[in-house]
Amino acid sequence: MSRQNTRLDVKKVNSELFTLTYGAIVSQLMKDYENVEDVNKQLDRMGYNIGVRMVEDFLARTNAGRCYDLRETADKIQYAFKMYLGITPALTNWSAAGDEFSLTFDTNPLTEFVELPDNYQNLKYSNILCGALRGSCEMVQMDVSCWFVQDQLKGDLATELRIKFNKRLEDAIPAGED
Amino acid sequence: MSAEDVLFDMLHSEIVSYLVPKSSEDEDLSILEHLGYSCGWRLIERITKELPRYKEELEVLKFICTDFWSCVYKKQVDNLRTNHQGVYVLHDNEFRFFSKLSNGTQYLKSAPKYATFTCGLIRGALENFGISSIVTVEIIRMPSCKFHIQVLPSSS
């Protein structure tokens, strides 16, 4: 019997399971909410919850130190995508002030098996990424905004995620504690 | 545990906490189970296309317990028992989704919801192999758990 040789490709199976599971929860959300905007919001919220916990894992794994400007942060974000999703987005379209940039993806593992029906053009399918970035940056004292500028699911050539640095968050001291 | 696996763990726990809110009195796990089912079904459809056909029910179960389990749960099933009449019991002594939970009795009550997705995953996987079943979970002591598989007689 040569059954022993039929070992599966562990990496591939897991990444497909991840993609399928994400797809399943998105379609469940589409059933649960009537309004597509609410689905986008819920995906963002889930991403945020993941992000606030993930940044800790990231720091523990990489021993990353403090970032002194947004370009350093961008490099770290790029590296995190490589670590967690196995893709390396390009860092592009820096604003003149250096407070805004884009992550451009050729491939997006979340959307590997996905086609968006015409009537769901407002769905931000990968919105969980925006939430995750927002959440993880918030945990390292950065207030950022994220949104999709282009999306391959909607027929664009690439998927482009825009990140804007708003402000540094100061540690808020609870009232009466100072 | 690799970084990608951490991400899946987090997605899994987000899904659980979305579908089974803490405040709900009687937990409805059916949607969570169905989510697992559809993932299991689709995943098997994709990963078995290069594999030879499994003729025996037991062979399929062994495939689930070894190859499939070690891919997804990072270890093989510790024990597989059967009464040779369609009942199989899978023991996992260190279930992946319990690894972040305390091992005491404190969270024993909320543990089933972290195994429900897997129940569905097994049921969906078996269904794609042409085996209809009912999968339930029994948790006596964390982090171990037992999955009971009751194979239903085929309708054909």
Image (cartoon, rainbow, N blue to C red):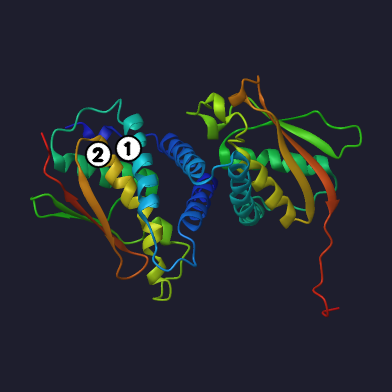
**Image height of A131 relative to A176, above or below:** above
Question: Which type of secondary structure does the marked residue at label 2 adopt?
Answer: helix
Q: Which mark is residue B118?
A: none
**Residue A153 placement: quadrant:** top right
Residue B141 in the image: x percent, y percent? 32, 70
Name the image quarter holding the C terminus of chain A. bottom right
**Residue B153 placement: quadrant:** top left
Query: Neighbour class for label 1 at 10 Å: few (<14), some, many (≥20)?
Result: many
Residue assigned mark 1: B41
Extreme residue toward the right, this view: A97
In the rendered structure, are the residues bearing label 2 and label 1 in contact, judged by CB atoms less than 8 Å apart? yes
Is any part of residue A25 visible from this angle? yes
Which amino acid is tagged 1?
Trp
Q: Residue at x 83, y 37 (%)?
A: A100
How many discs mark residues in the rendered view?
A: 2
Question: Which type of secondary structure does the marked residue at label 1 adopt?
Answer: helix
Q: Residue at x 37, y 56 (%)?
A: B29
Residue assigned mark 2: B127
Q: Chain of mark 2?
A: B
Residue B76 in the image: x percent, y percent? 31, 50
**Image height of A52 relative to A178, above or below:** above
Which amino acid is tagged 2?
Glu
Query: Neighbour class for label 2 at 10 Å: few (<14), some, many (≥20)?
Result: some
Q: In 3D space, how far apart are the residues under numbered discs 2 and 1 (Cα atoms)?
A: 7 Å
Is any part of residue B75 visible from this angle? no
Q: Residue at x 59, y 48 (%)?
A: A42
Q: Is residue B104 left or right of residue B63?
A: right
Q: Is residue A115 left or right of residue A138?
A: left
- Compare marks 2 and 1 and give the one earlier in the sequence: 1
Q: Residue at x 36, y 40 (%)?
A: B38
Residue A174 in the image: x percent, y percent? 79, 74
Residue A12 or A24: which is nearer the viewer?
A24
